[in-house]
């Protein structure tokens, strides 16, 4: 475990505060640099003072940020808060990354371990910094971490006993620049070359790519909907070596999308962690979906309302469309993260009755999709909700799955989802029937 005498903490959000708390508990001198409290001149003076053993960077500071460039120029090693927290954990680690579905997977894995009688703490990109999770649960047998590509950019020695890559789909290309760079960044979840023997779980279609890219020595475990995967999903069951090991019928994961990705991956993780599949099934049956992730708000007039505000890219939107039942009235749009809207046309034509568009992406989405199914440019979420409500009939679903970031009209995807939920509640209170 690397120790420090003086550390620069870059960023003072929740992860920066957690890093400072951990370091100060070890007697380390910390200096905080936050964009909200100092200017570039102030940062220059801090850096000139020197003497830093390391810089702990919050995920919001990308490689192109001038402060990061200055830190590198000064020869100061940079670590993400995630790696600092992980390095202080005395137990074993499960780490999950991917373009979509990470939070749901880490929650299910943590609850699986707990159902098996293990002590497990959850953290990382999930919303609880790794440093905070380790400080608050020092004796946990397992640390279950959600890991973003932003955190993986600066990892050095980070490795997990069980590392899971759920999927690699277009996302955050404004920061990473290309799919090739994004994929290689995601591959860092599998750790340095010294990670031989660790279990690495990948979708079967990506196994060859990552075996070649990461190198030999790992235990590769594949998952997916294909029968040739080590853990495969079909007809409500996850299979392993030809036999059903996990019954997901009647759970939130009983769908080709969630079963073939999350269900099969979690079954593989349970096996790699050495806990019974029955623990994963128990956790699945008691699973409470996270807010804004295919969250069913209820029904009014026979119409189901589903909040999937966390779908900030088109691949996540497509997965939501596959998971929902009935005729769908889709609320989409926001701050675009992608410019190619064509690859979702087939699922839109198959599953969607009408689309109600909001935010900056609405014009481009309208031009791309109006020939596939009827589109209406609504401008705001309130107008889109009203228009979809007027069009929907009993048996239909109104789905908020924007396929875009939220920052053009909202502070976060959470605020966007909460606004949608508030509109649903107001409608019910005004006289709609709900269940």
Image: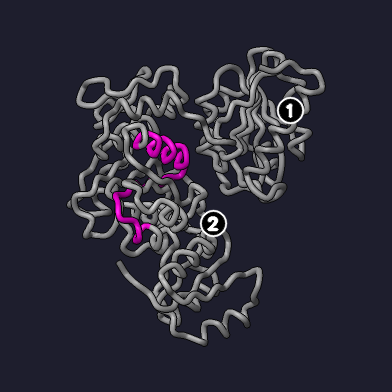
State the extent of the magenta-drawn residues as a range.
Answer: 86-113
Total marks shown come to 2
Q: Residues within 10 Å of mark 1 (few under 14, many from 20)?
A: some
Which sits in the foreground, 42 or 204?
A: 42
Which sits in the foreground, 163 or 81?
A: 81
- Identified at 58% across, 17% down, the residue is 326
Instruction: Answer with mark 1 or mark 2, whichever residue precedes in sequence.
Output: 2
Query: Residue 221 at x, y = what percent?
Result: 25, 39
Secondary structure, mark 2, is: helix
Q: Is residue 148 at all visible to an observer of this figure?
A: no
Query: Residue 319 at x, y = what percent?
Result: 50, 31
Is residue 224 positioned above or below 189 on the image? Answer: above
Can you name the residue that lies furthest to the bottom here? 49
Is residue 52 positioned above or below 10 on the image? Answer: below
Q: Which residue is mark 2?
A: 174
Q: Is residue 421 at all visible to an observer of this figure?
A: yes
Choose top left, top right, bottom left or bottom right for residue 77. bottom left
Is 95 covered by the magenta stretch? yes
Q: Quadrant of the N terminus?
A: bottom left
Query: Residue 288 at x, y = what percent?
Result: 51, 30
Does residue 273 appear to the left or right of 256 in the view shown? left
Q: Quadrant of the C terminus?
A: top right
Does residue 127 appear to the left or right of 164 in the view shown? right
Choose top left, top right, bottom left or bottom right for residue 13. bottom right
Which-is-in-front pick, marks 1 and 2? 1
Query: Residue 425 at x, y = what percent?
Result: 73, 27
Residue 425's label in the rendered image is 1
């Amino acid at each position: 475990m690397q120790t420090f005498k003086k550390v620069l903490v870059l960023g003072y959000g929740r992860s920066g505060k957690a890093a400072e708390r951990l370091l100060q508990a070890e007697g380390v001198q910390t200096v905080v640099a936050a964009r909200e409290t100092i200017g570039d001149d102030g940062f220059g003076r801090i850096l000139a003072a020197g003497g830093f053993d390391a810089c702990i960077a919050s995920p919001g500071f990308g490689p192109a940020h001038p402060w990061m460039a200055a830190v590198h120029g000064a020869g100061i090693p940079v670590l993400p808060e995630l790696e600092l927290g992980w390095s202080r954990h005395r137990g074993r680690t499960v780490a999950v990354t991917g373009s979509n579905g990470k939070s749901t997977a880490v929650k299910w894995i943590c609850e699986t371990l707990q159902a098996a009688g293990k002590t497990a703490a959850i953290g990382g990109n999930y919303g609880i910094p790794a440093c905070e999770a380790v400080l608050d649960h020092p004796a946990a047998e397992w640390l279950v971490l959600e890991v973003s590509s932003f955190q993986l950019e600066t990892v050095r020695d980070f490795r997990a006993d069980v590392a899971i890559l759920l999927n690699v789909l277009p996302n955050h290309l404004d920061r990473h620049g290309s799919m090739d760079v994004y994929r290689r960044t995601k591959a860092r979840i599998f750790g340095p070359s010294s990670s031989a023997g660790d279990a690495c779980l990948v979708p079967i279609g990506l196994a060859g790519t990552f075996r070649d890219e990461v190198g030999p020595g790992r235990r590769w475990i594949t998952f997916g909907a294909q029968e040739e995967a080590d853990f495969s999903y079909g007809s409500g069951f996850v299979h392993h070596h030809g036999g059903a090991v996990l019954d997901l019928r009647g759970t939130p994961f009983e769908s080709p999308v969630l079963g073939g990705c999350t269900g099969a991956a979690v079954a593989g993780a349970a096996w790699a962690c050495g806990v019974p599949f029955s623990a994963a099934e128990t956790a699945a049956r008691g699973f409470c979906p996270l807010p804004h992730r295919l969250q069913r708000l209820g029904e009014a007039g026979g119409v189901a309302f589903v909040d999937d505000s966390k779908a900030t890219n088109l691949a996540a939107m497509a997965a939501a469309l596959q998971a929902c039942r009935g005729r769908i009235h889709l609320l989409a749009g926001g701050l675009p993260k992608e410019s190619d809207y064509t690859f979702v046309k087939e699922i839109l034509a198959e599953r969607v009755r009408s689309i109600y568009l909001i935010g900056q992406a609405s014009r481009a989405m309208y031009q791309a999709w109006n020939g596939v199914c009827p589109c209406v440019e609504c401008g705001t979420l309130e107008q889109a909700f009203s228009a979809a409500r007027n069009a929907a009939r009993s048996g239909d679903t109104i789905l908020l799955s924007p396929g875009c970031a939220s920052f053009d009209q909202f502070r976060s995807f959470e605020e966007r989802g909460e606004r949608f939920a508030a509109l649903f509640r107001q409608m019910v209170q005004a006289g709609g029937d709900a269940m």
